[in-house]
Amino acid sequence: MRLINRRPGRPLAIALAMLPFAAVLLAYVIGSEMRLAVNPQDKLLPAPSTILDTAIRLISQGDRRTGRILFWHDTWDSLRRLGLGVGIAALSALVFGMAIGMLPHIRKALSGFVAVVSMVPPLAVLPILFIIFGLGEMSKIVLIVVGIAPVMIRDLSARTLEIPREMIVKAETLGASTWVIATRVVLPQVMPRLIQAIRLGLGPAWLFLIAAEAIAAEGGLGYRIFLVRRYLAMDVILTYVIWITLLAFLMDWGLRALSRRAFPWTGAGL
């Protein structure tokens, strides 16, 4: 049997999935032990036990000055900004993507503009956003929207254009209006693509959020990482990085589960 036709069983599939993580962890442990053997005070690669102790302290002990557990406040601040940014971007992508894909006049007017905007490096316009919207919450949310919405709009407009013309013609023959076609024919076709676009946009969205928080913020996961970097507190930094990675994974897993449950015919397996 050819390798392309072989499928691993469930135990082997789980083992293969865990193998890269185990390899990275092993490499880190070896590197940490080597550095600590030379210099027990080394801060670059703290021992896994040190990271675990730091994580327990961060999630359970309050700040000496305010009494608040900063870890959870930082998490809430970042998730609020991320949720608003991704939500606005998704809604904009759905509306403009369907409009560009369905309506020729809108497509002629906006498709080129959206294509050009999607090529602009979002971090390059961050200073402009700070000047226009200030250093508060708005600039961070707008950066996420500017960073992921244009690409999502292009993706959804392309999916709308892929809908077979026969489906549109049949709906028109039955007397459906443009609004009915949009809600009954096009919307069910693009919703699975929207979820996939959000999944793909989460990575860049986290990047833009962390960058904005690092430059100007009074709280948030990115703010805390860049605040403690001056002290070479790698145990704190790695704890936050692991937590961000876990949050991103859970978001992606939730969206994948939603896609499987709501749209099983799409075969959302990745």
Image (spheres, grey):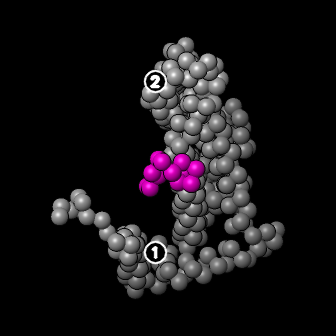
Q: Which residue is mark 2?
A: 166
Q: Secondary structure at mark 2?
A: helix
Image location of residue 176, percent across then percent down: 62, 21
Separation of marks 2 and 1 at Cα, in angstroms: 60 Å
What residue occupies the far left of the structure in this picture?
1
Q: Is residue 177 above or below residue 268?
A: above
- Judge by depth and name the residue closer to the eye, 244 or 18: 18
Residue furthest to the front in view is 174
Residue at 69% across, 31% down: 132
27, 37: nearer the viewer: 27
Q: Which residue is mark 1?
A: 45
Q: Relative to 245, is 62 on the left or the right?
A: right
Q: Is residue 260 magenta?
A: yes
Q: Position of residue 38 (x, y in %)?
A: 39, 84
Please report the residue visible at 18 percent of the width from the left and 61 percent of the height from the top: 2
Q: Amino acid at mark 1?
A: Leu
Near-viewer residue (152 or 140) = 152
Q: Is residue 203 in view from this perspective?
A: no
Q: Quadrant of residue 79?
A: bottom right
At label 2, which amino acid type do we have? Glu
Q: Residues within 10 Å of mark 2 (few under 14, many from 20)?
A: few
Which quadrant is home to the C terminus?
Answer: bottom left
The residue drawn where x is 58% and y is 58% is 254
Q: Which mark is residue 33?
A: none
Q: Which residues are magenta?
A: 259-270
Residue 149 occupies quadrant? top right
